[in-house]
Image (cartoon, rainbow, N blue to C red):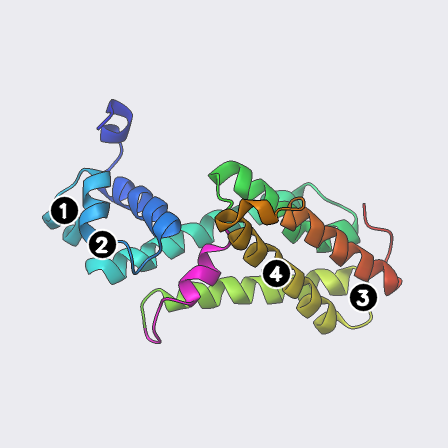
Amino acid sequence: MTPTAASRTARERLLTAAGELFYESGIAATGVDAVLQRAGVSPATMYAHFAGKDGLVAAYLEDRYSAWHATWDDVLAELDDPVDRLLSVFDAVDRYRQREGNRRGCAFLAAATELPPGHPGQPWLAADSLLLTGRLRELAVAAGVDDPDEAAATLLLCYDGALARSAREWTTPDLGAGDPVRRARDVAAAWLTSRGTGAPA
């Protein structure tokens, strides 16, 4: 373990290790031993902070949710134009990927296919969905879209499709035809223009 890694708390090291491994390999495929080895901590230390693997998964998703929420907040704070603000979800994804180095798709969509009902990580999957749908609708209202619910649903479809495509291109790079997130932003902008909603940048 490097001095920098050792200087972080055991909880931070566990969350970092879990975040890397759950995202890279999947939650089900990642055993606790792999997380402990990468974090450089003992089982007793992990159980002092988390209620087993399920608790660690929930904390991992909470950590990602907080980082994603903060990134989108940062992007919105830089924008004034209502249509640009509505399209900011794509800009936020792009910035989040640059900060975190994540290009394998959405951790929440991936986790949704793995976590059973009642899992302690489920509330964070719900929180992500509520953030997306609620904020997109609010931004659509502010942009003067005639049907904010339809706009939110359409942009969310573009968003989900872009992240799913990112995951597909991660495993099959030769499918690539440009950045899916930027293509999705263009599609969403064109759809908004077709509805007479401003002229997105």
Query: According to the image, label 4 marks what residue?
Result: 161
Q: Secondary structure at mark 3?
A: loop
From where the camera sits, is residue 73 visible? no
Which residue corresponds to the image point at 39% horizontal and 56% vertical from the top-left? 61
Rendering coords of residue 73 (x, y %): 59, 48
Rendering coords of residue 72 (x, y %): 59, 49
Query: According to the image, label 3 marks what residue?
Result: 145
Looking at the rendering, the stretch of residues picked out in magenta corresponds to: 104-118
Q: 10 Å neighbourhood of mark 4: few (<14), some, or many (≥20)?
A: some
Query: According to the image, label 2 marks what residue?
Result: 31
Which residue corresponds to the image point at 72% horizontal and 56% vertical from the top-left? 86
Between circles 3 and 4, the one closer to the viewer is 4
Q: Pick whichever, 36 or 196, lies toward us.
A: 36
Query: According to the image, label 1 marks what residue?
Result: 45
Looking at the rendered structure, the number of numbered marks drawn on it comes to 4
Q: Amino acid at mark 4?
A: Gly
Q: Secondary structure at mark 2?
A: loop
Q: 10 Å neighbourhood of mark 1: few (<14), some, or many (≥20)?
A: few
Q: Quadrant of the N terminus?
A: top left
